[in-house]
Image (cartoon, rainbow, N blue to C red):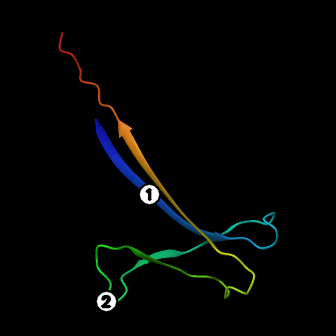
Amino acid sequence: MQAKNLANLKAFYNEGKGKGSVINLPVTKVHPEGMPQELSFYSVSLHDGLEKGKSFNLLLAMFNILAAQKKKRKK
């Protein structure tokens, strides 16, 4: 059996009450000075500053996929 780990990190926002279109934001991996290399840090660039009362969503989805490999029988 073979396992593969997949992860997807997305940042997005929308204006209004959730009925408007979603705008994807760029996410980049960063290495802050003085922090351990074993930890992962990400930076999200907002188009405009985040105003009081506004929200920002960051979604991290991780998947484990197990794939069984069938052995071929010799005849």
- First of labels 2, 1 by sequence position: 1
Relative to 31, residue 59 above or below: above
Give, as a three-letter code, the residue at label 1: Ala
- Badge 1 is on which residue? 7
Q: Is residue 75 left or right of residue 54?
A: left
Image quarter where the N terminus lies is top left
- Between label 2 and label 1, give the one nearer the viewer: 2
- Badge 2 is on which residue? 34
Give, as a three-letter code, the residue at label 2: Gly
Circle 2 residues within 10 Å: few <14, some 14–19, many ≥20: few
Q: CA distance from mark 2 to mark 1?
A: 26 Å
Secondary element under disc 1, as helix, strand or loop, is: strand
Residue located 31% across and 89% down the image: 34
Q: Which quadrant of the figure has residue 47?
A: bottom right
Q: Is residue 5 left or right of residue 15?
A: left
Find residue 60 and report its horizontal and vertical position in percent: 51, 62
Residue located 21% across and 16% down the image: 73
Image quarter where the C terminus lies is top left
Find residue 16 and report its horizontal and vertical position in percent: 81, 72
Q: Is residue 49 left or right of residue 10?
A: right
Relative to 1, residue 38 above or below: below
Find residue 43 and report its horizontal and vertical position in percent: 49, 80
Secondary element under disc 2, as helix, strand or loop, is: loop
